[in-house]
Image (tube, grey):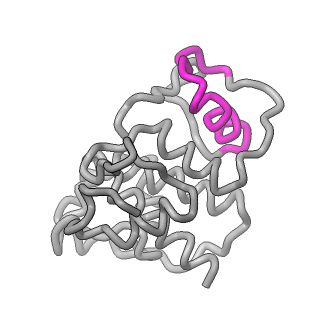
Amino acid sequence: IAFEDIQNHWAKSYIETAVGSGLFTGISGTAFGPDISTSRAMLVTVLYRLEGSPSVAQPAGFTDLHADWYRDSVAWGAANGIVNGYDEKTFGPDDLITREQIAAILHRYAKYKGYSEGASGNLSTFTDSGEISGYAREDMSWAVGQKLITGRTADTLVPRATATRAEAAKILVTFMDQRNG
């Protein structure tokens, strides 16, 4: 893979695996954009690709799905309980995804696939664990226990920070490796 912007990047091997598996594409023929934030639509599209891009019976009821590249992905994710909107009409496809949102979506995807829960992590070891939103506490504990999400530093999770494409690639490749054992 000839992405010029990952040659000395900490996530190079994860990015190469994610692109080689067809989960991610570059932002151009020579750039991956590892430090660009990931959108909600991007993440659900990666999971949709992981599922083999199944046909979608009906569109999601969200009124803010304006681009063709993610419409089926969001409809599939919503129909299977993997993604939720902010409300019945708003998904926020272009909103930048947070680390806790990735944990919640990936945890729902694991349940959808019937994967065993596995160990939960101890969130109290992180000084900012109180910043995790109520809806995402169980999901973050699961993601930490599965070593999908690690601290940005030794003692901080930064749960509401946006996740970069490199972080998303690492999380998803780690998830796939654990399931393919």
Residue 164: x percent and y percent? 30, 51
**Above/below status of 30 relative to 42:** below
The answer to whether residue 22 is visible is: yes
Q: In the displayed orientation, state which residue is furthest to the bottom.
A: 181
Viewer-nearest residue: 147 or 72 = 72
Expressed as whole percent of the image width and height from the top left, the position of residue 82 reads 62, 46
Q: Residue at x 56, y 79 (%)?
A: 178
Image x and y of residue 149, in percent: 37, 66
Asked if the magenta segment contains residue 141, the reply would be no
Quadrant of residue 67 within the rendered picture: top right
Q: Is residue 131 positioned above or below 17 on the image?
A: above
Residue at position x 20%, y 59% in the image: 128
Question: 32 and 95: which one is in front?
Answer: 32
Outermost residue, top direction? 63
Above or below — where is 146 with respect to 28?
Answer: below
Q: Report the magenta residues as a range.
A: 61-81
Please indicate, yes or no, whether residue 142 appears anywhere in the rendered image.
Answer: no
- How many discs appear? 0
Residue occupying image coordinates x 54% and y 30%: 85
Image quadrant occupied by the C terminus: bottom right
Q: Is residue 58 left or right of residue 161?
A: right
Residue 68 magenta-drawn?
yes
**Quadrant (top left, top right, bottom left, bottom right) of the N terminus:** bottom left
Residue at (40%, 69%) from the top-left corner?
A: 14
Q: Nearer the viewer, residue 7 or 82?
A: 7
